[in-house]
Every structure is written in C-alpha cells, then in structure tokens.
Image: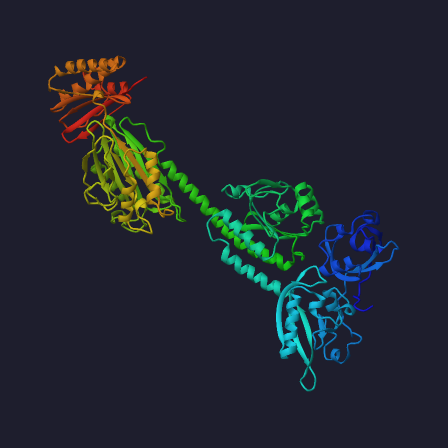
Amino acid sequence: MEGHVPLVPEDLAVVVDAGGAVLVWSTGARRLLGYEPAEVVGRSVLTLLAADLPVSARRHLADGQRWSTEAALLHRNGDRIFVHLQGIPLDAGTGRPLWLVTGAVPAPPSGRDQPGAGVLWDLTLAQLPMPVAIYDREARLVAANEVMTRIMGLPVAEMRGKTLSEIEPRQPWLEYDRLQRQVLRTGKRMFLEEQSQAPGEIREHSWSMYFSALTDETGAVQGLSAVVFDTTEQYWARRHLAVLNDASMRIGSTLDVTRTAEELADVAVAGFADFVTVDLLESVALGDEPEPLRPGEPVAVRRTAQRSVLAGCPESVADPGDAFRYPVNTPPVWTLLAGHGTRHRPGDPGMQEWLRSSQARADTVARHRIHSVLMVPLRARGVTLGLVHFLRHRTPETFTEDDQRLAEEIVARAAVSVDNARRYTRERHTALALQRSLLPGRPPGLAATEVAYRYLPTGAGADVGGDWFDVIPLSGARVALVVGDVVGHGIRASATMGRLRTAVRTLADVDLAPDELLTQLDDLVIRLDREEGPEVPGRAEAASSGEVGATCLYAVYDPVTRRCTMARAGHPPPALVTPAGDVRFLDLPAGPPLGLGGLPFESAEVELAEGSVLALYTDGLVETADHDIEVGLGLLRRALADPAAPLEETCDQVLDTVLTGRPADDIVLLLARTSALDTAKVRTWQLPQHPAAVAGARKMACEQLEAWGLTDAAFATELIVSELVTNAVRYGDGPIALRLIRDAALICEVSDGSSTAPHLRRARVYDEGGRGLLLVAQISERWGSRQTPTGKTIWAEQPLTS
C-alpha cells in the first residue's frame, strides 16, 4: 500500500462506530495501552486521546476518507504513547461508515524507492531518513519518501500532481509554496528555518528546509527538491542556553524573596515549562531560619509564586500566600529529602498517592492533561529553602534528563538569590525592630505643648539609618525636643543612636542647659568612636577616627515664660511658624557635629508667641538626589504655611510636598505647637533670706492651694515648702523665690542664688538636721534640682488626683 508506515509487533486494531464509540478492542490494543476490553468498549474514543488529532486527519474523518497520522494516546497508567494511526472507512450498510483504526509505535523509517518517480526521482537520494519531496517545473508534487508522507499525514497518491498550496491551503504552507516557485524561477537554492506543526503530527518541531533547483545537463531547471531536517534537539539545546542566559539576567534583580521567586517562575515558563510553582518552607516564608526536614513528617510550605502559559494560572490548587503541607511518602517530600531533582508522570505509584491527597489536584491534572512533572528542591549553602514544581500539559514532550539539568541549574542560581534576599530581609527587619524599639512611642501628654511626628525609614536598598527624635518632659512644666542623626546605616548606627538617645535622656534629667548637654554628648561620641575604632597600638591615646559621628538639635521650651532655648551640633536649623503664618528658619549658631571634640556649642533663646509651631527635622527630608537643600527648605517653608492646621495633617502635608520620590535616607519630622501656661495656674513669691520667711511661705502656699481647690495636698505641700525654703535660707544665697505650678502635677520650686547642688544624706539618730530632702523625696513623686543663670532651683512634684 503506497505511503504505508512499517509498524512494530503488537499492532493496535480498533473498530469505532460513526459516533466515536469503541465497538471492538483487539489484544494488541490491550497490550499497547493497558486497557481491558470491558473498560473501553462503548466508551468514546476521544477519551483515549492525549491531544487532538492533526487538522488533516480531522478533515478526512469529516469527509469519510481514508487517513493516516501521528497521534498521542493515553496509557491506562497516565503515560503518553505516540503511535502512527491509519483510519479505513467500512461500509456498514447504514449510510454512516464504521472505522477500522490500526496502528502501533512506528519503527524508524528506512526509505525506499517510490514507483513512478522516473528520471527526476533518480536525481535525489531516495533513501535519506528525513523528509524528501520532488516537485516539477510547475511546483506540483511528483514524489515523496515515506517520512514526508508521514509528517504530511497523506499518502503520495493523494498529493501527487498538487502544489503545496493545494495540499495545505493555509500558512505556513502557502509561504513554502511561494518560496518554491521563487526557486523554480531563479534557480537559486533557498534555506528556511521554521518552528511549526506538520499536518500529520501532533507536536511542533523545529525544521531546517532546503529548497534546491534540479537542473538537467544543459542547466535548465526541470523541478526542485525539498529536503527537511528535524532540528528539534538542536532547537531545545539553544533554547536551554537562552533560558540560562535569561535566568542570569532576570533572577535576583531585587533583595525581595517574593519577587525573586516570581522571577524564577517567569523565566521557567518562558523557557521550557507550562506551569511553575515556587513553594518556600513555612519558616523561610515567615523570615525565620529554615527548619530541618525530618523523615516521616509532613513538610509545611507556603506558595510564594506561580506562573502559567494560561491566563490566571487555572492549573493551580493554591493561591500565592496560601500555607499547606506536603503529605508524608509523596514525591515532594522525597525530593526535598533527596536534595536533587526528580521526574514523575501522573501514573507513577508515588504520584498517585500525591494526587489522592487532594481531589482538587487530581481534578486539575486530569482536566489540563498534565503529563510530566519535574520537582527541584530550592537549596543554597547546603540549606533547603523550598521546592519548585515544573509541569507540562501544552508541551507534548515529557521532561528529559537535559531538562532536569537545566531546571536544577536555574533553581540553584535562584536559590542563592532567594537566600540572599531572605538574609537581607531578616537583617533589615532586625535593624528596623531595634531602631523602632529605641524610638519613643506615643508622645507624652503635655499641658502647654502639642506634638506630632513622622519617622520614615529609607525606602532604598540601603540599611536603616540612625535618625532619632525624643520628647522629654522636664521639671517646671518644661519640655525638651530632640532630633538627631547618626552617621552611617545598619545595626551599628541604630545601636549608636540608642546609646545617644539614652544619654540625652539622662543628661536631660540632670537639667543641663542645651549647650552643656551637647558638650557632654560630644564627649560620649568621642569615647564611642575610640571604642569602635580599629585596634592599633596607642589607639586609646589616638585622636577620634571619625567612624562614629552624629548631628543633634536640642531645644527646651518653658511654657511659663514662653521662651525656648536651643543649641545644635551640625544639624539643620529648625523652622518657626508664627501664628500669623510667617515661616522662618531660626538663625542658631551652627556648632560642630558631635564627635569632633574641642569646639564649643552655643545656645540661643527665642520667645515664642502663643500658637507658634516649631519644626525639627533631619537632613533626609530636605536633601535628596533630585534637588539640593535650598530647594528642599523652600518646599518645607511652603508646606508649613498654615499654622492653624492640625499637626497630624501638617505632617502629611510636609511629606507630600517635600518628598518628590522614595527617600534615599531616613527621615524624622517633629512638629510642636507651643502655648503659654495659664497665669492662673502659676504663683510666684519673693522671700527674704531670713528664718521667719519659712512660716510665711507655708501660709501663702496653703492659701493658694485652697484657692485652687487642692486642700487635700496642703499637708504634703506645706512640708515640702518648709524644707526647701529652710534649706535655701540656711545654705543658699539671695534672692530666694517660691513658685507653685498647677499642671498635670503640682510643682513646688524654690530658687536661690547659690549654685551648690543639694544631695541626700543619711542622718544619725541624734542629728538635728539632714532629714529635709529625705522627707521631700518620700512625700513627692519625684524631685530634683537644676542650674539657672543666677543660681539653682530645687523642685518637687506631687501627683494630682481627679
């Protein structure tokens, strides 16, 4: 029979009715596909197809004509088997023919002489094991070898005398016909590479085609030959190289675990898989260290990324972010424990167990005809991070050893990037947690100062920085506002920031003046620099290395006097917004950055109108890559122009106006709206330096408490006033003043002209004195002293109940 393809033993023979139901199932069909007759007879033959029949076979079926084609059938165990089928119509006397379908796994084509080829056929190598066809001067088929008839899906008798455009009136065959006519016209050979599916096949192949003119002894063109080489293997080799190159370019572009997993899935789907999932171990997905895998236990994972050649990933039974477990004794667990890639088919015993563990998974494998699965563990530096699944359902070929090696290479490269991203994310979260733990939480409630702030860690790839701020309540209803910036980034900068913030709080409790506080802070930075600098001989005596440095602005606002004293160490100047809406940057002495040593700091005092707003910030707010500091200060001035707006809204307005992109450095913005303490809540008396002043002071204090309705605090206040005024009269210098302040607490202050600081001491049994400050400390909630330009002030606070 012309165009017949030789078959190996165990030929398949099936009789199918006009509706497609199987009527007869031969022994050869049972041996080839594994189904018993009782399982198949009466069943639609379409359920045995792993892929649709080629176009040519479907056309001949519809016309009731004999056909021949390659097809992919489903074995009972789920495997795909490629066979060459032939369909012969049988007259059943009903007007609707039965079909006798025969076939088997084709043997390698041997090629033989085609009868009737004549002189032109002798000019070709008829025995070549690749598709060969001969055309006459009108581009009509004269002869073709058996390999060509197989890929065309038609016997020679049906193709002879026709042009390619008549045999297959569609692209790319119409283009091949045009090229053949061009060869016949010009006599020049033409070469073409194409990726396409032949009419008689169900898979795409990569073809290299040569159209060559056939000439006689005189050189006249008598026809042409078409020789086709199957270069699919070379195509896949080039494709693998392209995938590796793509992987090296695209995977690891960011230090983000999820994005890196998505890049891996993108590369694999674009390269050689139809559906890819990336599952990270649950511990890795949560940012922790990978937990060891234990045989005999299920493995908890989280879907991190997935990609498909189909829109929406319909093959997936989980969504990104979903957590689930790989059951024990299933291929995913085996692969993770083995530490290398494994290939599977749905019919494998292990895969059957895997599919039975999830009905949704079994349904999607059947619905999408997934026929090949490749699993590769995601491992880096000897540690398993997760598992990558590669699946095929649109690509007919199963995964090969070359595919597995390619997948393992891609996954290995991605694993290093995932591990780097995981480590970076963990360290960054640690640094951010450390930094945030060192920053203040909710601002304290202040009677005469409203505070709002914003803290933004850098949005760039750099580590966190050392910016900080603080709001510290001081004695006498005063408040300290602090903003600072440590040089550098990372955990070291955050740790240094924490030490400096703690030092500022300690020095603020001592009630040092702003310039004196910065001097003490400067000494601390120098000591830290020497401790953290390189260990070299004589390092302790060496000068500061400059590895540790910082800038700082320290301001103290007194709501009684409405005066604010400030000093800065290399920090940007604060902005002052008046109640009328005027914005100006205060001209404070700049001062050197902390850590230089030997240079003085100067304080400046400003009287603030009630309702003024102070804006303190770090340089990351006004200095960016796209504009200099002067432009940033201008944007800040514009954003602060509304003094009556709520401070929270003003903070957002500043960030929206000043920041034109993602910040390259940490940003701190601290806003404080000041007001004066109600004069009715403050009472001051000048006292003579005489013992008789003590009784008068007690009396005046008690009368004031009665006026305030605080008679419950009269006894304790009377005792505090008595002890503090007595100490001032005995050990201090004039002038002496007593001040009571009714704020969140009841504050009692006694000032004198001596700078000698008081201290507690333990009095002996027979001592007549030495117990005054001890009593004050026991009665009050807190007490202390501070230096003033004219001497000192000793104060004590008592809590006020509702």
Instruction: Give the residue displayed 62% in from the left and 60% down from the top.
Output: 402
Write down the quadrant of residue 211 in the picture: bottom right
Instruction: Find the residue positioned furthest to the bottom.
Output: 218
Q: In which quarter of the image is the N terminus?
A: bottom right
Which percent across, then down, holds residue 357?
67, 41
Instruction: Give the residue displayed 45% in from the left and 45% down from the top.
Output: 425
Which percent across, then down, holds residue 533?
31, 48
Q: Is residue 604 above or below residue 478?
A: below
Residue 120 or 570: which is nearer the viewer? 120
Residue 334 or 648: which is nearer the viewer? 648
| Left-right relation of 733 to 177 | left
Instruction: Give the residue displayed 58% in from the left and 62% down from the top.
Output: 239
Instruction: Give the residue displayed 38% in from the left and 38% down from the top.
Output: 436
| Left-right relation of 290 to 40 | left
| Left-right relation of 433 to 140 | left
Instruction: Find the residue positioned furthest to the right.
Output: 93
Q: Is residue 405 above or below residue 724?
A: below
Which percent across, then down, holds residue 256?
47, 48
